[in-house]
Image (cartoon, helix red, strand yellow):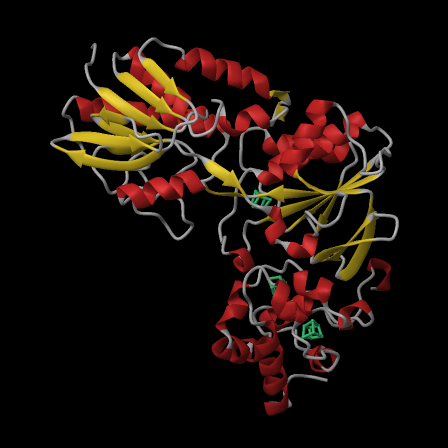
Amino acid sequence: MIMAGSVIVIGAGSAGMEVSGVLARSGVSVTLIEKTANTGGHVKNWHHLFPDHRDGADVVSYMGVRAGHKLVNILTGTEIRELSRKGGKFHATTEGGSELTGDAVVVATGFDLFDCSRKEEYGYGIYDNVHTSAELEEMFRAGRLTTASGKEPEKIGFVHCVGSRDEKVGNLYCSKLCCVTAVKQAIEVRKKLPRSKVFCFYMDMRMGGASYEELYREAQEEWGISFIRGKVSEAGEMIDHRIQVKVEDTLVGRPLKLELDMLFLMAGMEMSEAGARISRIAGLKTGENRFLLASDNHYGSNRGNVEGIFYAGSCTAPMNITETISHARAAATEVIDYLNGINLK
Amino acid sequence: MNRFGFSLSKGRQINYDTNDRSAAEYVIAGEPSLLACIECGGCASTCTSGNFTSFSLRQLNILLKRGENDSLRDELRKCMLCGKCTLVCPRGVNTRNVILLAMEAFNKSQDYAV
Ligand code: SF4
Ligand code: SF4
Ligand code: SF4
């Protein structure tokens, strides 16, 4: 069926682009708003993706094709200031003062990476050789993985759960993707620097996705990566700018210290600032984890508490790309039902 | 018998049926946050005492919960109550209070071995 109707989609990452494309192919006019200068969200910053090390650019170009429809009008560098509903229509005002209208709204504002400098004890932003997982992707992309002084690193560590599962930063939840990201990145480091030794410090290995456990095993068997069970309590800088980590090797039951050339912090996922703003403007309920609250845990994950406003992707919970794309497609079917006047709660 | 390596020594198994968990129950009643411990070892890693002695608060937590109370009374004496462990605990366990209550439990009852 060819639909009439128009939808405002907020956020042009993988969720926003996918939902826009599906809606457009059903005949719905879409205004896709993106606050940054470019579409593609976080994926475009990722060099390679788990579990198969494929090029992140593949997914970005896929998203471009999916959302590249004449009914999708993409507005980059645009943010919403006001959003209200009058006479069954949503009216949005952008920061620049333009007015947009839509019969429905899809929030696809995604996540922000945890700001690792908030865990001061790990020294991010203080020590030269402490970086985030996202920065490691940039290094891979640039093809240059060296210490701050330009040397090839020999010992490299990954700290899991930075900004997740941590009451001290107010994030009780697990970000779900950082364990497998650490495993993926650890393997990539070993491939790039065959002489290196790589250590992952974890509290639990959460390998719940397709092929994750297999990747973990590959990391052990083929790449000799050491997995040490313990939460790193602190990292300190040595006089030669190497990093010393302190951890309890809980399986041995003794404290352990280790000097590393580089330390990477697996930054967790948080509700994005943009999403938090929309939730305030539009009165959308959020959960204890600050992500948008679903109307129902089992069948309402694309809906919240305001009729006509739908959710797609990791604005509702940490999700990988596969899940984000599926969630976005599901959001599109919910929107189409809604535009057809079908409201099965 | 010795051919099979059997002896009359006490088994190594944790006997969860017979172990006395009343010390753990006492501590948990006064400090329920102990229930949230995930044995990550953050506390033991940062502990000044643990870097020089066998003391590990993480280990103490789990032994207490399992009712493996032998040795705990002596272990507890190694804590200096500095509270560093409380600062790092990702699960918000009030570790210092756990230690104080455990000391109290062991002082109240001489039943807990050693
Ligand atoms: S996925 Fe792993 S590293 Fe990430 S928060 Fe969960 S347990 Fe921690
Ligand atoms: S309070 Fe006791 S257990 Fe905690 S860090 Fe200090 S000495 Fe260690
Ligand atoms: S830091 Fe907290 S959660 Fe971790 S072992 Fe110690 S008490 Fe348990």
Residue appearing at x 40%, y 37% in the figure: A315
Q: Return the residue nearer the eye: A96 or B8.
A: A96
**Where's ligand 3: which quadrant?**
bottom right
User: Looking at this rendering, what residue extends furthest in the left direction?
Assistant: A87
**Relative depth, front residue between A248 and A283:** A283
Q: In this image, A243 relative to A72: left or right? A: right
Please say whether residue A299 is visible from this viewpoint: no
Whether residue A69 is visible: yes
Residue furthest out toward the front: A97
Side of A6 relative to B16 (left or right): left
Q: Is B1 rendered above or below residue A289?
A: below
In this image, A288 relative to A150: left or right? left
**Frontmost residue, A227 versus A243:** A243
The quadrant holding residue A55 is top right
Percent position of residue A151, x then y: 87, 34
Percent position (x, y) of residue A345? 19, 36
Q: Position of residue B64 (x, y in %)?
A: 62, 73
Q: Is residue A212 above or below residue B20?
A: above
Q: Position of residue A70 (x, y in %)?
A: 33, 8
Quarter holding residue A328: top left
Residue A302: quarter of image: top left
